[in-house]
Structures are given as C-alpha cells and as structure tokens.
C-alpha cells in the first residue's frame, strides 16, 4: 500500500520594528494571492477560436478506417447536442470498461483503444469520445480534474486512493458545453471557471486542459496526474473561495 505523506510549508516572516510613517508601511503579500496569480485557469485554450480544436493531437488522431466504422453504425451526426449524445452513447455501447486503477492513463492512442474496443477509465473514455466528435466537426477539449473532497482528505492524510475525473468541453450551437463520459452534459457551462459542480461530494476542480493527455502533459510524463493532484491538495486552502461558485444542471 502506498504511504501517504502530508507536506506542510512553513513560512517564516521576519518582523522588523522601525520608525516609519504610515505611507512607508508595506502590506505583507498573501502567499495564496501570489500562487493563484501564477495560474492560467484557461490553461492556454483559445475559446474564441473553436476551430483550432478540430485538429487532433498525436494521441487523438483517429484513423479514417475507425471513423468509417462509427459512420457506418450511426451515420453522420447532426450538429447539435443530439448528435453529440449519439456519438457518446455509441462509445458506451461498443467499448468495454476495464478498471486499470489509473495504470493505463495516457498509455494508448485512440486507434489502439479502437483495436481492442476497451477503455480503462475516464481518461480513455474522454479521449475516445472527444476524438470521434472532433472528426465529425465538433471542436473538443479534454479537461482533467481533481475531486475537491479528495483534496481535503489527502491533505489530512486520510485518502486511500486518488480521486479525480476527466471530461470534455464540446463546441456546439455557438457555445461550449461540458460533456461527461456517461453522456450527461451541462448546457449553461462556465468554461472559465475551474470549479465544476457535480454530485461528487464537494465537486471537482480543473487542473489541465488540451486536445488530449499527451498535449497537456507529455507522452513520457506518467506521474503528471498524480503530481498535479498532490499540488492541488497541498494548496487547497488557496482555492476555497473558488469552490461552490457555480450550480450546474446536468441534463441527459
């Protein structure tokens, strides 16, 4: 069993007693302000140029033969939310889930998943769904999140495993919607807010976005997800004002 560690950052701030005027006094900077200001919560996504996200990455470049397999089964989906759900349901009905406990994160391309008709968790499910939708003309971005309750538990040393989720942002009808791999979605989605309201305890918090896992991490960076989640947990007090800032209605 993996040993969990709590990392505590002790900040020592020296205090100097000097004779000075009120105008000379300087406010001690809040470490959380500096930390949060260093984060780009758009994660480099150019939401005003959705066509950029019709271009797949190395991991999400679906072959013509596999695209034709989908087209032969469902035809060409309409450019609306029903078309998105049609693709999502096809994936869930034609791929088998095999729980790999996170060991297969970022290991396979979308074509390799097609060959074995298997996904190993939310990473690969979101990869398959978003890759197909992109080929049908829907701009798609994968988003990776940490479970907020897990962040508190890990910080306190009580978490027994890592808990997060991967979903997709899809551009349709001139707006970005949030699509989960179980084919539920948020129509009134705030793409600029990293907090995601769900039925998962305290919700989820985004820490990465891109066309696929290999784009926002690295093909060989196998510890990316765990490292980013640990960083989130270590600094969870800095994020608290951002929690519960949206209330989403998830549709089927």
Image (cartoon, rainbow, N blue to C red):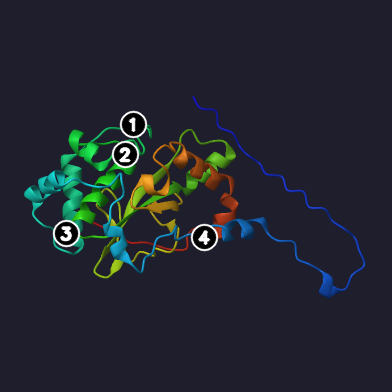
Q: Earlier in the sequence, mark 2 or mark 1?
A: 1
Residue 57 lies, in percent from the top left, at 31, 49
Choose between 175 and 211: the one closer to the eye.
Answer: 211
Q: Which residue is mark 3?
A: 83
Mark pair 3, 4: CA separation: 33 Å
Mark pair 1, 3: CA separation: 30 Å
Marks 1, 4: nearer the viewer: 1
Callout 2 touching callout 1 (CB < 8 Å): yes
Q: Earlier in the sequence, mark 4 or mark 2?
A: 2
Visible residue check, residue 102: yes
Q: Earlier in the sequence, mark 1 or mark 4?
A: 1
Choose between 245 and 118: the one closer to the eye.
Answer: 118
| 83 displayed left or right of 192 | left
Q: Earlier in the sequence, mark 1 or mark 3?
A: 3
Visible residue check, residue 187: no
Mark pair 4, 2: CA separation: 27 Å
For mark 4, give the secondary structure.
helix
The crowd level at tag 4 (other Cα within 10 Å; few <14, some 14-19, many 20+) is: few
Q: Which residue is mark 2?
A: 121
Q: Which residue is mark 4?
A: 242
Q: Which mark is residue 100?
A: 1
Residue at x 13%, y 58% (from the top left corner): 77
For mark 2, give the secondary structure.
loop
């Amino acid at each position: 069993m993996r040993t969990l560690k709590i990392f505590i950052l002790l900040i020592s701030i020296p205090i100097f007693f000097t004779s000075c005027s009120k105008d000379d006094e300087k406010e001690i900077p809040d470490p959380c302000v500096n930390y949060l200001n260093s984060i780009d919560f758009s994660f480099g996504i150019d939401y005003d140029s959705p066509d950029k996200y019709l271009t797949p990455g190395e991991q999400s470049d679906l072959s013509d033969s596999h695209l034709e397999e989908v087209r032969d089964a469902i035809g060409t989906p309409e450019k609306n939310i029903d078309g998105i759900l049609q693709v999502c349901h096809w994936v869930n009905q034609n791929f088998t889930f095999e729980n790999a406990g996170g060991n297969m994160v970022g290991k396979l391309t979308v074509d390799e998943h097609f060959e074995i008709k298997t996904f190993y968790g939310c990473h690969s499910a979101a990869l398959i769904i978003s890759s197909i939708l992109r080929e049908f003309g829907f701009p798609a971005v994968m988003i990776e999140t940490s479970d907020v309750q897990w962040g508190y538990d890990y910080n306190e040393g009580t978490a027994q495993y890592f808990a997060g989720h991967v979903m997709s942002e899809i551009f349709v009808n001139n707006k970005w919607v949030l699509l989960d791999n179980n084919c539920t979605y948020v129509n009134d989605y705030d793409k600029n807010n990293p907090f995601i309201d769900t039925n998962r305890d305290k919700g989820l918090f985004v820490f990465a976005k891109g066309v696929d896992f290999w784009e926002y991490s690295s093909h060989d960076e196998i510890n990316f997800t765990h490292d980013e989640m640990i960083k989130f947990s270590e600094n969870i007090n800095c994020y608290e004002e951002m929690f519960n800032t949206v209330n989403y209605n998830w549709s089927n």
